[in-house]
Image (spheres, rainbow, N blue to C red):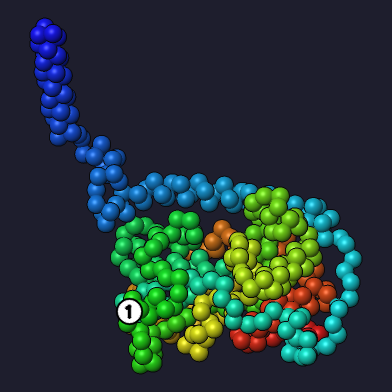
Amino acid sequence: MILNWVMLRKVVLASSLLLFAAVIIFDFLTRHIDESEYVQYAPIIRPREEREDVFVPKFKRYQDDRTEQERLQSVKNLGRMDLIMKANSDPLPPRAFYGTAEEMCSGKNGSDVCVPKFKQLETRIRVADQYKLMTCIIQKSMSTVMTAIMCYLYNERNFTEAGREFARECTAVRFCQNKNEFSQVAGVRKEHNISTKEETKKWKFTMITRDPVDRFLSGYVDKCIRIPRSSGYCNGCHRNMTCFILSEYDRIKTQLARGRLFRTFEDRHFFPQNWRCDLHKEYDNYRFLRYSSDPSGTLLEDLSPILEEQGVPQSSIQFIRDQLNAGRTVHSTVQSEARTFYENRLRSSPFLLEYIVRIFYYDYVLFNYPFPDGF
């Protein structure tokens, strides 16, 4: 028994010495790591506020590869005109309701036929508080561009020193993620003490709006044709636009009847614009800007006076101008043959246009867009 106790003490002592030696060796090695090795492991041991410059080179390589892969896949999918034309060769019926859009949607049965206004779907706010600027972004209404602009204005120096570019910003890996973002206008008001009419007037609330037909076509070609995610994607309609329009209308009416909005990927891209941005409360406080397929033209002309009013330096406005002139984002579909085909089919069909008006009637009214011919 005594022998066993002595042996146990020796084993414990030897283990302690080995552990102590290991600690000394590890400490010696970590104190002599080359600086290049330190930078390699910097994301783990440096403070969060010092990490952004470390991640940039790796992010840029990833983003370049991702953008090129997506571009090649886009060219392939948008080029399958044989399949697109075959899927949309069915004859289309005449209109179900003959009359103007107002007669259809504001008449006795208007609420049963057309989608109502000011439901609460989702709000995505971006701020540049040093200039008292706030914008609400909506998918397929220059959301990527406006997110990039507000991120730049949130901190011009950080954005430029990190080598960021507007055309390379995307939802998944945006530079200002969780920094200047809010999910309600009320959150902005609380954070920045915008509680009175006088304080509200010091801020500029902006929102990009888009012609409903143009926005629908952009979303449909981008999300359902350019990069479809699965066989059941876009309501399982594949390349058939008629199927998608009718099924999306039914989805909206069904969700309204149940009193619950699901906020799926399709919903965010195709439900009415007036259901966003807390417009049911803040409509009168917004300044609405018109979408343009060329953001370096119309958008900049509309946005520049607002930026100047809020004290944004001319050098920053020039940077924005240069970035907008640099080119389109990878999501742009306006120049594709597929977009031209779907636009011609939609605009030449009173039946399909009727359902577009049923869904987006209040977008036309609230944002002052002209109804399609015949409505």
Residue drawn where x is 14% and y is 31% of the image: 27
Q: Quadrant of the C terminus?
A: bottom right
**Looking at the image, which is closer to me, 122 or 329?**
122
Q: Quadrant of the N terminus?
A: top left
Residue under pointer 1? 192
The quadrant holding residue 352 is: bottom right
Residue 115 lies left or right of residue 159; in this view the side is right
Residue drawn where x is 49% and y is 59% of the image: 170
Residue drawn where x is 89% and y is 76% of the image: 94
The three-letter amino acid code for the residue at tag 1 is: His
Residue 234 lies left or right of residue 203; in this view the side is right
The quadrant holding residue 336 is: bottom right
Q: How many residues crowd around disc 1 within 10 Å: few (fewer than 14), some, or many (20 or more)?
A: few
With respect to residue 270, does 132 lie above or below?
below
Q: Position of residue 306 (x, y in %)?
A: 42, 84
Residue drawn where x is 13% and y is 22% of the image: 16
Count of marks placed on residues: 1
Decide if residue 93 is in sight here.
Answer: yes
**Looking at the image, which is closer to me, 145 or 286?**
286
Helix, strand or loop at disc 1? Answer: loop
Q: Position of residue 108 (x, y in %)?
A: 78, 90
Decide if residue 215 is in sight here.
Answer: no
Instruction: Give the farthest residue toward the front.
Output: 1
Residue 83 lies left or right of residue 300; in this view the side is right
Q: Position of residue 5 (x, y in %)?
A: 12, 12
Q: Position of residue 264 (x, y in %)?
A: 61, 62
